[in-house]
Image (cartoon, rainbow, N blue to C red):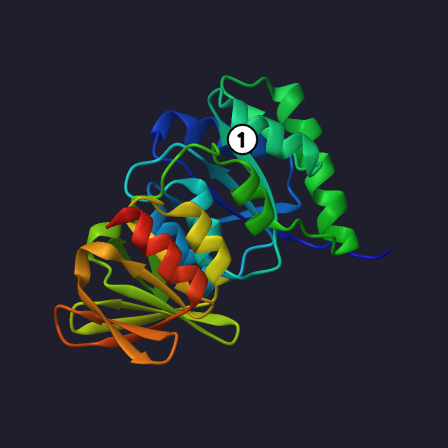
Amino acid sequence: MTKKKIIRALIVDDEPLSRQVVREYLDSHPDIEIIGECANGFDAVKEIAEQNPDLVFLDIQMPKLNGFEVLELVDKNMAVIFITAFDQYALKAFEVHAVDYLLKPFSHQRFDEALEHALRDVAAKKYGNFHAISYAAQSTDRIQERVLVREGSQVHVLPAETIDYVEAQDDYIRIQAGAKSFLKQQRLSELEEALDHKKFIRIHRSYILNIDRMAKIELYAKDSRIVILKDGTKLNISRAGYEKLKTLL
């Protein structure tokens, strides 16, 4: 007789009662081992990176980092069951991507249905595109006011207003914020879409500029210009970028 594989599960929810309900519902599933609990997104990022769970019960509405921000910062093959209060954008995204979720308050029966779905995904090694789900779950008119960067188990939360500019570097972006720079695996176009378009302008295929940091624009060569930041940094401007800047200045 083949021994049933033990599924390692992590519970992430800022509400102790909600974590307790998940624990109690899992009591009837001896093939699932609870490897830990987290009450906030920062701890979740650390635990997921270090413990490599097969399955995560992930609350969306949490302080510090929400569930989608947690997934933005981790790159692991795992099944996720989202736990949420009503959120029209999140629910629509889950349905489009066929990912299961638990809408608070949820019954034992509904929990078991979601768990069965997730366990099938684990067995088939079928994992959702959680970055796409996170992106789809955001309101299109919601401006991103901070950028998250993970370095090892450490998470940096950069308020958008502290960013000077962002530069594309192959599959990464380099975020310059004062004297510090941070690398993040993300497309420049994706970040451009999320930031405030009145303050952050795509001035070149390789650069997004916080216009509050701009000191002046200079002619560099015939039909070629550069922007000079207040700290003296020089960035190239494309023709299209120059036209965008002219409408704002």
Q: Residue at the far bottom: name it.
A: 221
Q: Is residue 43 visible?
A: yes
Q: Position of residue 154 (x, y in %)?
A: 30, 64
Judging from the image, what secondary structure is the residue with disc 1 in? helix
Q: Which residue corresponds to the image point at 46% horizontal and 71% vertical from the top-left? A: 172
Q: Where is residue 50 in the image (x, y as percent from the top left)?
A: 44, 65
Compared with 144, 46 (above or below) is: below
Residue 163, located in which quarter of the rendered image? bottom left
* Along the line of sight, the residue nearer the viewer: 115 or 100: 100
Q: Which residue corresponds to the image point at 48% horizontal and 26% vertical from the top-left? A: 21
Q: Is residue 27 visible?
A: no
Crowding at label 1, few (<14), some or many (≥20) Cα neighbours within 10 Å? many
Q: Split into 4 quadrants, where in the image is the N terminus?
A: bottom right
* Along the line of sight, the residue nearer the viewer: 131 or 188: 188
Q: Which residue corresponds to the image point at 58% horizontal and 27% vertical from the top-left? A: 91
Q: Residue at the far right: name it.
A: 1
Q: Where is residue 39 in the image (x, y as percent from the top left)?
A: 33, 40
Q: Is 209 on the left or on the right of 60, as rendered?
A: left
Q: Which residue corresponds to the image point at 63% horizontal and 33% vertical from the top-left? A: 94
Compared with 159, 25 (above or below) is: above
Q: Position of residue 211 (x, y in %)?
A: 24, 56
Q: Is 230 on the left or on the right of 19, as rendered?
A: left
Residue 213, located in which quarter of the rendered image? bottom left
Q: How many marks?
A: 1
- The residue carrying mark 1 is 90
Q: What residue type is labelled 1?
A: Ala
